[in-house]
Image (cartoon, rainbow, N blue to C red):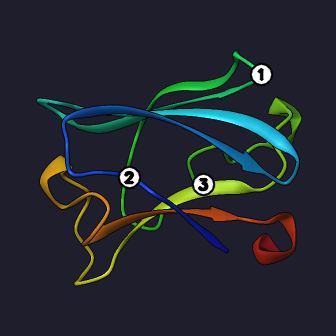
Amino acid sequence: MQVIPLQAIPSQRVTVLLANQNCQIKVYQKTTGVYLDLYINDAPIVTGVVCRDRVALVRDSYLGFVGDLSFFDTQGVSDPEYGGIGARYQLVYLEASDLS
């Protein structure tokens, strides 16, 4: 399990190496919630995925991403809001071994 460093801002993009995958992650707030786009080497894996507390964001291995991503509320069970991202709401990378 690895925490992805994010800031409490409404829209951001981070680049991170996860299981030897060059990942670009976009996290952004809309009126209907927080959303995530995931790219590997600038190729889209998933886009426009709504972020929920403790719900896998990629879910399907056929998409070509090793492992998964999920937000965790460290103070309860609420879905993330940008004002708490990076502190209360942590984006976590789960390795394939963590998922079984």
Mark seen at residue 41: 1
Q: Who's the residue at 87% across and 74% down the image?
A: 97
N-term-proximal mark, 1 vs 2: 2
17 shown above or below 74: above
Q: Who's the residue at 19% across and 41% down the image?
A: 9
- State the residue position of label 2: 6
N-term-proximal mark, 3 vs 2: 2
Q: Quadrant of residue 46?
A: top right
Judged left or right of residue 32, residue 86 is right
Mark seen at residue 86: none
Judged left or right of residue 50, residue 4 is right
Question: Which dot, 3 or 2, sits closer to the camera?
Answer: 2
- State the residue position of label 3: 69
Name which residue type carries label 2. Answer: Leu
Name which residue type carries label 1. Answer: Asn
Q: Position of residue 79 (x, y in %)?
A: 26, 59
Judged left or right of residue 60, residue 90 is left
